[in-house]
Amino acid sequence: MDNGIALYRAGWYGPALARFRQAAAVMPDSPYAHLWWGRAAVQAQRADEARGALERAIALAPGTEVARQAQALLQQLD
């Protein structure tokens, strides 16, 4: 996750996206991993992939700050 976040912050969205996919595969119940996956997918202009990751983050942590951030990103996709 840390490597993916560093890549994301450096503007390397494609490589960050790959790291977050890996993190979500290793930690499938982590809303945080899915939120970052969604963020990177939004920046990489992969709307369908972003939508899936963000919806999963919301499902894993309803009513949390993670869910609120994911919902805000989903609204940007509409």
Image (tube, rainbow, N blue to C red):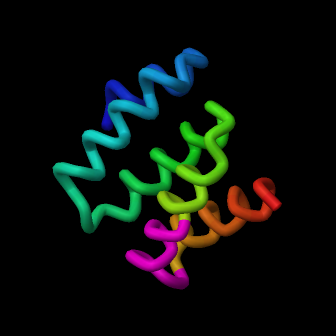
Q: Residues in magenta?
A: 55-63
In this view, 34 is above or below 19: below
| 71 horizontally vs 27: left or right | right
Q: Residue at x 34, y 42 (%)?
A: 21
Instruction: Reply yes or no: does residue 70 show up in magenta.
Output: no
Is 46 in front, or is 61? 46
| Image: 29 above or below 32 | below
Query: Residue 57 at x, y = what percent?
Result: 46, 67
Q: In which quadrant of the rendered view does residue 31 lie?
A: bottom left
Where is residue 27? Give x, y as percent.
21, 56
Q: Quadrant of the N terminus?
A: top left
Q: Residue at x 27, y 44 (%)?
A: 23
Q: Main secondary structure of the magenta part?
A: helix
Q: Residue at x 57, y 41 (%)?
A: 41
The residue shown at (45%, 79%) is 59
Q: Return the residue found at the far left.
A: 26
- The quadrant of the picture occupied by the C terminus is bottom right
Report x, y in % for residue 67: 55, 71
